[in-house]
Image (cartoon, rainbow, N blue to C red):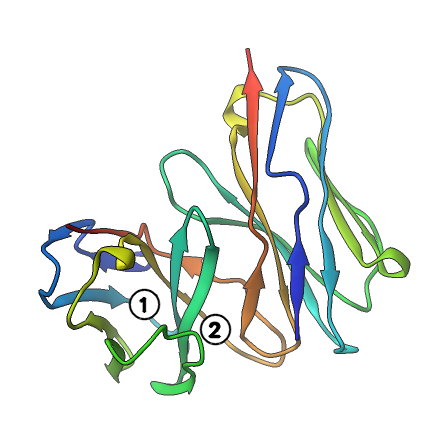
């Protein structure tokens, strides 16, 4: 069975602060994929990043960075210098090498101007 | 390129009525997924198709729910009869399944309200 836990249900930060969204996963698969998706207030779900289980390199994309640690089964997401436009619900997701994707419950991020 | 197209965007119906949600995946994608989103349960996978064939429908809540994919460019999710607890946002997503898991491309969702 696969499981994704996002322990933070809601986070509020003041604009320009850094914020980290936590994601812990469980799987028995040796090959798996991790994802982050963003759901802004408009409601659509937008893909942010995919990482496979064999690639533990951290990734940075602009103000976004991701820290993947197999030892702790975590795939955390950090937004640097947050902006109001970052306000959204962020979902961590897991797939065991086939197309079925399991999502976490989501973390609602509110960036206050 | 057009994204995943869902219709209708909003549906309000009375308990007991039949509801049909529609989805047009991205052209060329070979996997299609139906998800339901509620505050209590988050995003739940209901069913997914690969090359128009249902692969896993274990998430379909009960026999009142059915899904079809008659061709590569169209899928429906039907609820008959509908109940108030079916109220949720229903998302359709598609992807191009190759040798690795591909990101999902979501439609804008259908907000269903059953009164």
Reply above or below: B3 against B76.
above
Q: Residue at x 20, y 72 (%)?
A: B78
Q: Residue at x 79, y 78 (%)?
A: A30
Pointer 2 residue: B96
Labelled disc at residue A32: none
The x, y position of residue B98, in whole percent, is: 56, 79
Q: Residues within 10 Å of mark 1 (few under 14, many from 20)?
A: many
Q: Quadrant of the C terminus of chain A?
A: top right
Would you say B115 lies left or right of B51 here?
Answer: left
The x, y position of residue A29, in whole percent, is: 74, 78
The x, y position of residue A40, in whole percent, is: 45, 36
Q: Secondary structure at mark 2?
A: loop
Pointer 1 residue: B25
Q: Which image quarter: residue A112?
A: top right
Q: Residues within 10 Å of mark 2 (few under 14, many from 20)?
A: many
**Near-viewer residue (A44 or B97):** A44
Chain of the residue where label 2 is placed in the rendered structure: B
**Near-viewer residue (B18 or A32):** B18
């Amino acid at each position: 069975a696969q499981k994704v836990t996002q322990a933070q249900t809601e986070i509020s930060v003041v604009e320009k602060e850094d914020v980290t969204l936590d994601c812990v996963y469980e799987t028995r698969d040796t090959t798996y994929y991790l994802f982050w998706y963003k759901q802004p207030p408009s409601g659509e779900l937008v893909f942010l990043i995919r990482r496979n289980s064999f690639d533990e390199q951290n990734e940075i994309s602009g103000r976004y960075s991701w820290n993947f640690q197999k030892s702790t089964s975590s795939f955390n997401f950090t937004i640097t210098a947050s902006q109001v436009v970052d306000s959204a619900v962020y979902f961590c997701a897991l797939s065991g090498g086939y197309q079925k994707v399991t999502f976490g419950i989501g973390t609602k991020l509110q960036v206050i101007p | 390129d057009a994204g995943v197209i869902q219709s209708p965007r909003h549906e309000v119906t009375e308990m007991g009525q039949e509801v049909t949600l529609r989805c047009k995946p991205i052209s060329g994608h070979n996997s299609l997924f139906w998800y339901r989103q509620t505050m209590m349960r988050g995003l739940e996978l209901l069913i997914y198709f690969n090359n128009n064939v249902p692969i896993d429908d274990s998430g379909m809540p009960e026999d009142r729910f059915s899904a079809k994919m008659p061709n590569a460019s169209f899928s429906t999710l039907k609820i008959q009869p509908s109940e108030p607890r079916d109220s949720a946002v229903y998302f359709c997503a598609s992807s191009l399944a190759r040798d690795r898991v591909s990101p999902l491309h979501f439609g804008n969702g259908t907000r269903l309200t059953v009164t």
